[in-house]
Image (cartoon, rainbow, N blue to C red):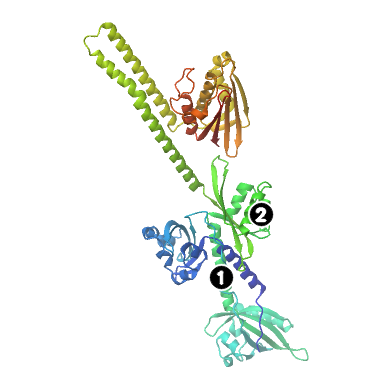
């Protein structure tokens, strides 16, 4: 007779929880893995390995050195000594190149966490490998696979065991005897407790008391086999009552669940291992279902939520509760795109409390079930401030180099033209002084011309020095500067001119201050104000309008006058050039606008100009905050 015993709900829930967790990990691009260091064998590896390496999980499970063979020959030295570090209980993080199965080269980041036993021996390592060649590569759909873990409960095989009222065995079938490791005859006549240790015996005695009172139960019992090994069995126990209602013994339908117990323990360990990786990765992850309710998250995600939203993450809460009403339409659009199979990845930035900027890379991933139905979503968020800052710094250095090259070209022009001319004059005039037939008056004229050439050369040298100083990296400390204070200081310094020409300043500062270098901003506004007054329309009082506005992460400063204006169609390319002048009716050297642009760029700003002849000029400057 064969009776099928149903798998307990607790095991089904545990299997479902593990399956959900594996669906989550197999949906990500990162490769999660565990290695048995005692047997030197890969015991778990996520499906991301095939996308990253071009090799299937089964290949890594069969060949424990495959990961090393795929490392680029020039980078193999980077992993030398890695096992010694892990033996000390220290984490390992390395970046190196790999050669995929299709022979293409990719960069990966590999992080490994050691696990030591109570004796301090390295028994297992858990790790995560991610593709860092292109942080936005999230195009492949994640396929669900359960090839690296086995079923919790295998096909049930039942044994039949009956005992009499004295707990003596009076019948076992062959399957039952096999479970205990005996022949059927060896089991007959033995007490139920002969196959248990002291702990199991105490538990069984309590069960048998309930059986005598007519109780039916389904229990998990641990037995000892003939060889002394533990075997777990699920028993469906029923009392045997005769026609008079007297207890005559018990009947048990027994299923060997040893493998199920081992699987259950393995799943718990696996889940604990994956949770360790989950909570120790440098990316935050939030998993939520198709109804937009949070299912799981790691510690870093919770910390980000507290920092950015002042809210702790809670399982069961709606994702929408963590975004503002203005932000939610954008998020909903991202989710709709991901549900359709789109790869969504973008960068965001925000200002920290210390006024520094933090950059994050955000990825939205869809989790599909085996029928390719949308099961939920993953929000991955990684702090990329260091990488982004380095990239921005490279861009700044490149821009500075380009500007320095332009400056060198400009300086070459100055030296070859503006300095060469007075030097040539001095040489020629000096040779004239050597002539013996010059009278005193002629010599005096030559000396005066030499003196004038020297003064011209000195002026050019002073201009070059001023330009070089403006281009140097300043050591001045940045501070909070109020725009109105700068305007007041400028008006005071040129008070006589302001009063004499009836200059009118109109100021409207939506942003009243900026964190920058005071001397540079003062010089910029002073030069623009001086130019506006110098090139005003005859007979019309100069009107200077200065405004400030907030533009996301920039402050815009607008400076406008009602002066003569500039013909940009003719002069736009030379507008900020050195010694470039567009109005010769007024004395000047063509240094002002060149110095303005130089100083604006020195403090990380940009400048543009709008102007028409007869309609005045407007300068638009934008500074990062």
How packed mark 2 is, by other alpha carbons closer than 10 Å (few <14, some 14-19, many 20 or more), is many
Quarter of the picture containing the N terminus is: bottom right
Quarter of the picture containing the C terminus is: top right
Tell me the residue at 34%/18% (across/down).
454
Q: Which element carries disc 1, helix, strand or loop?
A: loop
Q: Residue furthest left?
A: 436
User: Where is 323 relative to 192, above or below?
Assistant: above
- Return the x and y of residue 587 as percentages of the image width and height: 47, 17
Q: Residue furthest top?
A: 440
How packed mark 1 is, by other alpha carbons closer than 10 Å (few <14, some 14-19, many 20 or more), is some
| Residue on which disc 1 sits | 146
Tell me the residue at 38%/29% (across/down).
411
Q: Which element carries disc 2, helix, strand or loop?
A: helix
- Return the x and y of residue 400 as percentages of the image width and height: 44, 37
Q: How many marks?
A: 2
Q: Nearer the viewer, residue 50 or 250?
A: 50
| Residue on which disc 2 sits | 319
Residue 360 seen: yes
- Return the x and y of residue 445 as percentages of the image width and height: 31, 10
Task: Indicate which disc, 1 or 2, sits on the residue closer to the N terminus.
Answer: 1
- Return the x and y of residue 579 as percentages of the image width and height: 43, 24
Q: Residue furthest right?
A: 244
User: Where is 59 relative to 418, above or below?
Assistant: below
Tell me the residue at 53%/82% (across/down).
228
Check if mark 1's residue and mark 2's residue have beta carbons within 8 Å. no
User: Where is 105 relative to 348, above or below?
Assistant: below
Q: Nearer the viewer, residue 163 or 289?
A: 289
Residue 117 seen: no
């Amino acid at each position: 007779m064969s009776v099928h015993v149903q798998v307990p709900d607790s095991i089904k829930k545990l299997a479902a929880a593990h399956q959900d967790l594996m669906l989550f990990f197999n949906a990500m691009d990162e490769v999660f893995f565990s290695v048995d260091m005692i047997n030197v064998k890969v015991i778990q590896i996520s499906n991301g390995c095939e996308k990253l390496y071009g090799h299937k999980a089964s290949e890594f499970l069969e060949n424990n050195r495959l990961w090393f063979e795929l490392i680029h020959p020039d980078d193999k030295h980077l992993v030398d000594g890695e096992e010694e570090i892990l033996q000390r209980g220290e984490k390992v993080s390395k970046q190196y190149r790999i050669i995929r199965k299709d022979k293409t080269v990719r960069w990966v980041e590999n992080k490994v966490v050691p696990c030591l036993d109570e004796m301090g021996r390295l028994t297992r390592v858990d790790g995560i490998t991610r593709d860092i060649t292109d942080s936005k590569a999230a195009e492949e759909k994640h396929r669900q696979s359960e090839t690296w873990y086995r079923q919790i409960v295998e096909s049930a095989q039942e044994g039949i065991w009956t005992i009499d009222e004295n707990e003596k065995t009076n019948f076992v079938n062959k399957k039952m005897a096999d479970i205990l490791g005996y022949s059927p005859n060896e089991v007959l006549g033995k007490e139920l407790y002969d196959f248990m240790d002291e702990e199991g015996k105490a538990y069984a005695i309590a069960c048998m008391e309930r059986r005598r009172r007519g109780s039916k139960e389904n229990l998990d019992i641990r037995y000892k086999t003939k060889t002394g090994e533990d075997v777990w069995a699920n028993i469906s126990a029923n009392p045997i009552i005769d026609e008079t209602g007297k207890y005559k013994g018990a009947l048990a339908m027994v299923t060997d669940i040893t493998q199920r117990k081992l699987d259950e323990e393995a799943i718990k360990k696996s889940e604990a291992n994956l949770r360790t990786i989950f909570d120790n990765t440098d990316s935050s992850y939030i998993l939520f279902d198709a109804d937009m309710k949070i299912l799981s998250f790691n510690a870093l995600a919770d910390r980000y939520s507290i920092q950015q939203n002042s809210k702790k993450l809670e399982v069961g809460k709606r994702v929408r509760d963590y975004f503002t009403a203005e932000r939610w339409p954008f998020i909903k659009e991202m989710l709709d795109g991901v549900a359709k199979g789109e790869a969504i990845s973008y960068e965001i930035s925000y200002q920290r409390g210390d006024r520094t900027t933090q950059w994050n890379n955000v990825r939205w991933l869809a989790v599909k079930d085996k029928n390719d139905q949308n099961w939920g979503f993953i929000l991955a968020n990684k702090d990329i401030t260091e990488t982004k800052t380095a990239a921005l710094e490279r861009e700044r250095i490149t821009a500075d180099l380009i500007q320095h090259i332009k400056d060198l070209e400009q300086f070459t022009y100055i030296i070859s033209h503006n300095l060469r001319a007075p030097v040539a004059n001095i040489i020629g005039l000096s040779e004239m002084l050597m002539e013996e037939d010059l009278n005193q008056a002629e010599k005096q004229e030559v000396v005066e011309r030499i003196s004038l050439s020297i003064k011209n050369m000195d002026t050019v040298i002073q201009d070059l020095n001023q330009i070089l100083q403006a281009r140097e990296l300043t050591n001045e400390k940045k501070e909070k500067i109020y725009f109105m204070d700068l305007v007041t200081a400028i008006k005071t310094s040129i008070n006589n001119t302001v009063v004499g020409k009836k200059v009118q300043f109109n100021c409207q500062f939506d942003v009243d201050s900026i964190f920058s270098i005071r001397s540079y901003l003062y010089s910029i506004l002073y030069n623009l104000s001086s130019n506006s007054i110098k090139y005003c329309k005859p007979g019309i009082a100069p009107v200077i309008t200065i405004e400030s506005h907030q533009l996301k992460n920039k402050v815009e400063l607008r400076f406008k006058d009602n002066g003569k204006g500039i013909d940009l169609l003719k002069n736009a390319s030379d507008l900020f050039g050195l010694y470039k002048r567009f109005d010769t009716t007024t004395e000047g050297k063509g240094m002002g606008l060149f110095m303005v642009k130089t100083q604006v760029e020195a403090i990380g700003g940009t400048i543009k100009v709008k102007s028409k002849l007869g309609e005045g000029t407007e300068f638009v400057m934008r500074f990062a905050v």
